[in-house]
Structures are given as structure tokens and as C-alpha cells.
Amino acid sequence: MVDTILRLNGITKKYKKATVVDSFSLTAKRGHICGLIGPNGAGKTTIMKIMAGLTLQTSGELEFFGNKDNLDEERKRMSFMIESPVIDPLMTARENMEYVRTVRGIADKNKTDEILKLVGLSDTGKKIAKNFSLGMKQRLGIGMSLITSPEFMVLDEPVNGLDPEGIVEVRNLLKKLAEEQNVTILISSHLLSELSELCTDFTIINHGKLIESFSAEELMIKCKSRISIKTDDINKTAAILEDKLGISEYKVIHNDEIHLYEMLDKPATVSRTIFENGLNITKFVTEGESLEEYYLSKVGDVNE
Amino acid sequence: MNKLVKAEWYRLRKSGTFLFYIVLVCILCVAVALLGNRKFFESDLSTNAFAVLFGVGSFMYPVFISTMLCVVASMGHHSKVAYYEIMDGNKTSHIILSKHIVYLPIVLCLFLIPMLSLLGYSCVKNGSGELIDKPIWFFILFAAIILRIVIGSINIAMVLKKLVACAVFSYGRMFIEALAIIPFQIIGETQKNSDILKIADFIKDVTVSFQIENLTTNCNDTRFIVMVIASAVFEIVFGYCMAYRSYKKKKFN
């Protein structure tokens, strides 16, 4: 059984003169949940569309399940939910599900009921999808991507519009699929706190370029703890930290706060030194960086 | 391809009331053709039955049918559910042909066969009249034109993919054809230029509106027969190639 489910190698997509995706590479292992993170217009959806066969890359290579020659054949083992959920607004939830079941050649008719129940839409009756709430549409879209029992799912903003309970349900469902059925999932979302709880791997993309790829374990190390300090003179504090304690790993945030990444095990020494140099400490907290903050620091660095 | 045909048929039946409208338009076209030409039922028909049934303006029937088909076929792209066919990795040729297989029989059963049956009935009862020596050619050419229009509309829907563009193009197509000839005729006649007049004649020979208009008078003419069949084959093949190319280039928004 192939262990590497997805391999994107140097994918570039140009629309006339604009380069939307620039030499982007990504690998996904079986059973992993990969989070694709980036601001609006970063190229996430374009990458997913290239994978789905809805647009052609200008250059670069795709490989699904170790096969780069017959991608269409391998797409039968995958499912996609790209941009907003693709549903026929004039059909009911059941009819939409039946349509996808027919297109994808699934013989088991019970599968429709099973999935409708799973995504909580079994009691929508004759209500057509046009009248669904955004959350219901998202659930239906997720259901339609589950009907084939895919080995690899590509989900673009799947929890967008869901209520908190719905978000937890989707998170648990995706975790269950990855853990119990070894399904590989590539997911993009703006809810970074959600991704940090769900994903095993992360890839940051900005302006179509790969910024960084790392695992959840690596993220833990990257988002190491820090000491946040606020005083009545932040520039003088920075100078004292450098001169008296020889600290170089720190950041001045918004000109009124210092994030200190050294001497985390000696907070008393740091606070005493600042105090002894005649400064009043208004905040002194040991805290950790979240995925969101880490992402913002990376994307911010690139934008600067 | 079987699953694609089933899925398209399912979508047509379940998505809104489009199937109802296709059926309605086809039946109305046949009914209007009959009711609007009462002479058709008279046994002492002095002119031929074909000319009666296909009087001036009868080319509007295919216009309505093709517009309806084009709009319905493009609905899959409008709602984007047609993406599932692509994301499932189906062959482009299978996707295009599945649409033809679904829509063609509907028009054949509800429009073409009833129209030809009526003409056949009239032919047996009253004779084919003075204008047509071999009514079989009339039947063949009429079928070729309808096939051209139906398959052409589906191909256009798959190329344009946009609902409004499909509606405007398929509805306006025959008017555009009719208008396209005017500049050539005016310039040709004012300048007495036979080459330009030949172009005007050629456009007349290959466009659907003029073919239908001249069907009752020219269907014994070998050149006319060749042009009708050749232009039908060309439009079907060209439209298929355009749809195929559009899918292969994967420009789906």
C-alpha cells in the first residue's frame, strides 16, 4: 500500500501575467490531516482546483497514490469539496446525495440514508437546498464528499458557517475518519484554532508560494513559551535586557510590549533586573504562542 | 458512461421543472404547427402539405426547442453540480456524449417523430403535392436539421457553460444567421460583384434558418441536399470538438 497519498511538485499556475501559485510543493501521508493555511487570495483554492481537475496547472507535477500518469483514475478514490459546497439548489438533500451517488457509480442505495443521518440532514424532507441555511449546505457538501468512502478528501473551508456544535461534530468526524479508516484529508480553513486541534501537518502559503511546512509536533516546539512584559518605558526595558542580561531573542510588539524567548526558566531574575533599574512592571506573564500567532508572524514577515 | 447518463437523467427529472418545460415546448411546437395550419387537414389540399406545415416562421419551433435544451443543459454548470462528473475523473468524451444521449431522444420522441408522422399521414392521404417529387428527402433533411440544432445546442451549452449566454446565443442564433447575409447581398448587388453574391448564397445554403425556409422548395435539389447534410455534420463535429477542447482546457470557474 502506497504511503504517500499526495505529492505536488513545483506547481505553478498563471492567469495571463498574474502568478497565482508559484512553484508550490506539498506531500501528504496516508491517514494524515494536512491543514493548508493562508490569507484570502493566497492560492489555496486554486491548488485544490488543480487537484480536482477543474483547472490545469501551468507547470509542475501532481501525483496521487504514487501515480502521476493516470490522475483521472486516481481521482475516483478521492472526494472534493471546493469553495462553497457544490449542490443543486433545486434538489432536496436526498436528491443531491442520490445524484452524486449516481455520478460516482455507488450501487449501495442505503449509503444515501446512512450519510444523511451522519451529517444530520435525514429529516429535511422535501425542503430544497436553496432554502437551507449555510450550515446545512456545508453539512450536505460534506455528506456528498463522504458518499464514496474516499481514501483522500480535499476540503476547502468545510466548517465555514457551521455553529459551534457543528464545528465540533465535523472535527470529530474527520478525526475519526483519519484515525479509524486511515483517510487522508487536506483541509483549508480560516479557523486556525480549529485546524490546530485537528491537523497532524500544516502548510503555510502566501502569494501562491510555500512559506513553511511543519508537523503538529514541530508546531509545539515552534510555538514555544515566552514571557510577555509591559513596563512604563518599553525601549529602556529592551536596552536593560540586552545590556544587563545579554538577551537577544525578544520582540517588541506594538511598541508597548516585549515578548521574551530566552531565560524562560528564570522569570524572577528578569523581573528583578527590570525593577532594580527603576522601571515599573505593569505586566509580567509566561505564555505560549498559538498557531494563529505563529501563522501571523510568518505571513507578516513575508508581507513586510 | 452508463452512470453519467443515469445521473444526467436523474438531474433533469429532479432539478426543478425543466423536464416539464422541455416536454411542454415540444408538444406546443407540434400543436401550434397543426392548429396554425388548418389547411393541413383538408383533403382537397391544392398546395403541398409540407409547404403548409412549414410555412414562413416555422423555423421558430427549433429555435424554442434549442433554447430550452441549451439552458437546461447548462444548468449543471450554473449550479456547478456538473463538476462532480469531472472530479470523478470521467473521460471528457463520455461526459459530452452522455448529455447527447439524454436530451436527443426527448426531442426525437416529442417533436421530430410527431412532426414526421403528421407529414407522413398527410403524404399518404393527400399526396406530396407539386413541389416535392421525393418526399423521403424532405424527411431526411428535416431530421438532419433538427439533429443539428439539438446536438449543436447541447455542445454550445458545454462550451459557454453560462446560463444567460446559452439562452441568448441559442435564441439569437437564427436571427444572427439571417442578418449575416444582408451586408453581402447589399454590397454584392450594389457593386454587381458576383463573388460577394456567391458568399451570400453560400451563407444561405449552410444556415439553419434558410435551410428550413427552403426545405419545401429545394429538397429535390442535389446541391441543397449535400449542403444540408454537410453543414449538419460539420456543426455537430465542430461543436463536439469545441466542447471537448473546453473540457480538456479545464476552464471551470
Image (tube, rainbow, N blue to C red):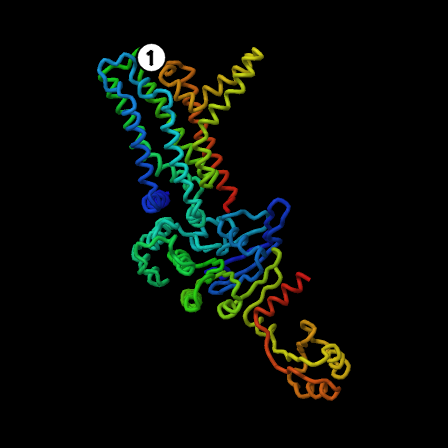
Residue A179 visible in this rendered orientation of the protein: no
Q: Residue at x 49, y 58 (%)?
A: A156
For the N terminus of chain A, the image quarter is bottom left
Residue B20, given in percent of the width and then of the height, sits at 31, 40
Image: A246 above or below B69: below
Tag 1, which secondary structure?
Answer: loop
Q: Amino acid at mark 1?
A: Leu
Question: In the figure, residue B214 lies in which quadrant?
Answer: top left
Image: A278 above or below A176: below
Local crowd at mark 1 within 10 Å, few (<14), some, or many (≥20)?
Answer: some
Q: Residue at x 55, y 68 (%)?
A: A215
Name the chain letter of the residue that bears numbered label 1: B
For the C terminus of chain A, the image quarter is bottom right
- Relative horizontal placement of residue A217, taking residue B163 as reference (left or right): right
Residue A33, given in percent of the width and then of the height, sits at 49, 65
Image: B86 above or below A136: above
Image: B65 above or below A287: above
**Residue identifier under label 1:** B131
Q: Residue at x 56, y 13 (%)?
A: B190
